[in-house]
Image (spheres, rainbow, N blue to C red):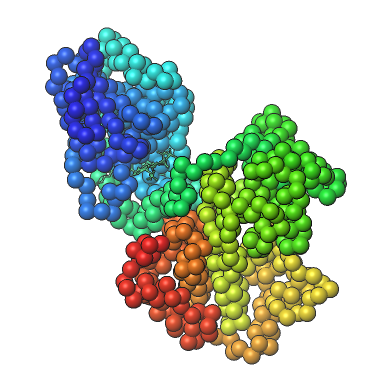
Amino acid sequence: MTAINEVTDLRIEGDVAIVTLNSPPVNALSANVRTGLLEGVTAAEANADARSIVLICEGRTFIAGADITEFGGKGPAGASLTDVQSAMQNASKPVIAAIHGTALGGGLEVALCAHFRVAVPSARCGLPEVNLGLLPGAGGTQRLPRIVGVETALEMMTSGRHVPATESLELGLIDELAEEGALLEGAIAFAHKVVEEGRPLRKVDESNEKVEAARGKPEIFEKFRAGIARKARGFLAPEYNVRCIEAAVNEPFAEGLKTEGRLFMELMTGEQSAAQRYSFFAEREVWKIPDVPRDTPKLPIESIGIVGAGTMGGGIAMNFANIGLPVILIERDQAALDKGLAVVRANYERSAKRGRLTADDVETRMGLLSGSTSIEDLASCDLVIEAVFENMAVKKEIFADFDRVLKPGAILATNTSALNIDEIASATKRPESVIGLHFFSPANVMRLVEVVRADHTSNEVIATSMALAKRIGKMAALVGVCRGFVGNRILAPRQMQANELLLEGAMPWDVDRVLFDFGFPMGPFAMSDLAGLDIGWSKETSKGETLRDVLCEMDRRGQKNGRGFYDYAADRSSSPSPEVEKVILDFAARSGKAPRKVSDEEILERCVFPMINEGFKILAEGKAIRASDIDVIWVNGYGWPVYRGGPMFYAEQVGLANVLEKLKQFEKDFGEAFAPAPLLEQAVAEGKSCRELGF
Ligand code: HSC
């Protein structure tokens, strides 16, 4: 065995040279990996005993891509990826990439320069650069369509999907499956076979058949663009990926590579990719809790109880049934229970209809759900979640019951989005077991969970809750107890400003358009219409004091009855309502404000800057661990466009000093709602980012 460098070894087994990379955690293509690869392959090529070269990785995965931390830095040192790829492709001996874990991005692009690829059945291959606001910049855009064809390449590169090994085999991305756990043996056997059969050394660059088949058919691309338009709205990277495949079809290989390089650099140096790369790391950091070490013991969670089988309780239950955990749902009476379970079944059956589940899956999942009208039946649960309506007295009663019924050590969680969890915990003699698990509606779909740490919540309960959230495929952020926790607390000032703007001369559709164009899936008024304007409104107590009261009194209750802030057609398309416009103008006149033209810029800043300000207050109060956690919450729970990173990242892109200056101006013009957070003032005074301030 020869050590090539600190991450690469070369050894000769019989007549096979084995180049092994070992650069934890994911063998990303950092400078020493590229150098090791180049020197390893070169040495293997020069070794007189070796008749073939196997490239394999130690650890959990094959190369998972370029080292993202190198992007946006000083520029790469060490060997270039192009030199590595040329050395492999131009080797006179067969080079075989042996893949386990994931061959992603630059990792797959390296593997595509081997003459052959062998993988274990659990391996996956993909070009997920699009999810980082990028495109494959090491020849992947030109080589992938040459192997899998144009349509599949378009789909793979714009979705970033990790393609399972069996499918990769069918697509020709890999040549042979090795036995699970015996990758090296399989790759060596394959290498022997290739040498014995004298197979020609395949260079993907030279096979043009599949790209030529799409030449002169621009409709392939137009149809594809139309198909992804909705999902890709606002993003640059999907379109740039498509353009590269167009180049693969219409230009010679070398020219296509140049187009790829130019578009890659444009994306890599742009704001969108910076935001998406930031998001990638933020979504990994969010799991790290400074005072709850990684090795904190976790409690075993094998059975769940949920009190409340309404929309929220049922949705939460589905998350656990989906991963095979039994759930018992508690309701006051059998009718409510039956209704709740019927809704869950209908949800599953809808998924089955869309081909996402089989009929058997539906039955298996429903088989894990049981119901009861007695809270005593929760006795053996490891975790219970209260998901009833927001009433402190009722919740305290339920938690007193939990305390009485549940075994010691069980986790007692509340799904409250508004109430003080410390007060709820005070109804028990075990506040250390009490935590908030704030799911978002629909809970079976929405990715975010705010894990809310109360005053006495134990580290074990926090660690277990975070791990459980990961197990059910959610993105979790640990937050502290405060009004609205982190997500809704930041939403409140936006909502307030959106309403204020209507009194000053903007219309709901103006505000919605500005926020939609910013990248939100919908604006606040379209959102209210979707949720229903009458949530929490009652005819008996309504006094026509707010715009919402007036609209509800006019039976404008939102999408559900075809009339809200907007008018809705039968196909649910919306149009501005002249009636609402008149109501708003009357309402504004009554409030004594003279209508004025509000610019789009002002709408955006009035809505977004107070959110940022609130974020700074949250950080100063210690209710979120880091600024990036706030961003994870807003991207995953509230539709903040990931290509703008999140409110706190966006603030730094705009410039904290600019945000502060505007807030001060707004404070002068519109009052104390805009009073800047002291932490924001400190950041600007010291010229520091949130991270530099320790957040
Ligand atoms: C790319 O490849 C561009 C190319 O086209 C080349 C362009 C050429 C440029 C030419 C210039 C002229 N880098 O996710 P986990 C860290 S773009 C650095 O928790 P899992 C991660 O932060 C890349 N670090 O593990 C974490 O660190 P921590 C395309 C990376 O088992 C640790 O590894 N590739 C990293 O759940 C574990 O990660 C991708 O987009 C990277 N590439 O999932 C793949 N990847 O422990 C991105 C991971 O300190 N990675 N880390 O928190 C993934 O999707 C997942 O990490 C895996 C593993 C599925 C690999």
Check the image and name the residue furthest to the top: 196
Split into quadrants, the picture shows ligand 1 in the one at top left
Instruction: State whether residue 220 appears in this view.
Output: no
Determine whether, in the image, residue 467 is placed left or right of residue 115. right
Image quadrant in which the C terminus is located: bottom left
Determine which quarter of the picture holds residue 235.
bottom left
Q: What's the residue at 34%, 63% (across, down)?
A: 692
Question: Which of 338/275 is in front?
Answer: 338
Determine whether, in the image, residue 460 is placed left or right of residue 308. left
Q: What's the residue at 31%, 42% (across, down)?
A: 66
Question: Which of 45/280 is in front?
Answer: 280
Question: Which of 613/102 is in front?
Answer: 613
Q: What's the residue at 79%, 43% (across, down)?
A: 376
Q: What's the residue at 29%, 12% (across, down)?
A: 192
Query: Can you give x and y, in whole percent of width and height, for residue 90 in the image?
Result: 19, 27
Query: Can you give x and y, in whole percent of width and height, for residue 203 in the image?
Result: 27, 26
